Image (tube, helix red, strand yellow):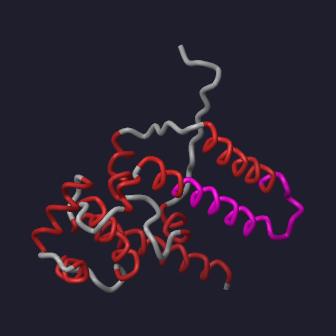
Amino acid sequence: SVPNSVSAFHLFYTPVFFMEIFKSKMPFPISYVAKIKIDPILYLENTWIDLLLIQVHRIKEALNDNKNIYQNEILVNEFSTLLFEYSNIIVREKFPQENSSLGNKDYLAMQFTHILVSDGKVKHCVGFYANKLRVSNQYLARIVKYATGRTVHYWINEYLIFEIMGLLKEKRELTTHC
């Protein structure tokens, strides 16, 4: 039996939308991304839940305001704020070690994702990322695999797929507006 105080929410968004919001920075520690695929339930303190519920309420209000000529822009902004707040909670409360020194394996893997997001459109070789992080290709491969359960090549390909999907969406929007 589940207590009355339990709340659950599902966030649905496309990978393209997510990547558009977080263009310049990976919002979550890479170890969180790997963990959440295995165990998608996150338990939060009431103060954090209250903060997120306020933002959910703002999204609901924006959804109901059909007369607002900037409804889409407001929804994107409010949803972005919700994701940023959620990311802040994850980094501060659930994975505080991600902000530690570069010797931390998870932190190094997270740094890899930051570089991937900024340079992934044009840089597809493991050596580029290893060089930027001042580690060997083999060490980077081991660390990323350890932190995420996935290879460096997997993450590069995944990022490229997100980018391609975004470009296809933009092209589709351009052709429908002409």
Residue positioned 67% across, 48% down in the render:
51
- Which residue does the image show at 73% across and 53% down from the upper left? 59
Outermost residue toward the right? 67
133 within the magenta span: no
Relative to 93, does residue 83 appear above or below in the rendering?
Answer: below
Where residue 150 sits in the image (x, y, percent)? 23, 57
For residue 110, what is the image quadrant? bottom left
Image-based side of 68 in relation to 88, left or right: right
**Image position, residue 151 (x, y; %):** 20, 62
Query: What residue span does the magenta drawing correspond to?
Result: 63-87
Q: Is 120 left or right of 59, judged from the image as shown?
A: left
Classified by dominant secondary structure, the portion drawn in magenta counts as: helix
Q: Which sits in the foreground, 57 or 172?
A: 57
Figure disc tally: 0
Q: Is residue 78 magenta?
A: yes
- Residue 90: x and y in percent read 48, 51
Front residue of 99 and 128: 99
Quadrant for the C terminus, please: bottom right
Toward which corner of the image does residue 117 lie, by quadrant?
Answer: bottom left
Q: Residue furthest top?
A: 1
Quick check: 53 left or right of 167? right
Residue found 19% across the figure and 58% down from its top: 145
Q: Residue at x 49, y 68 (%)?
A: 19
1, above or below 8, in the image: above
**Looking at the image, residue 103 lies above or below residue 9:** below
Give residue 76's position: percent from left, percent from top.
67, 65
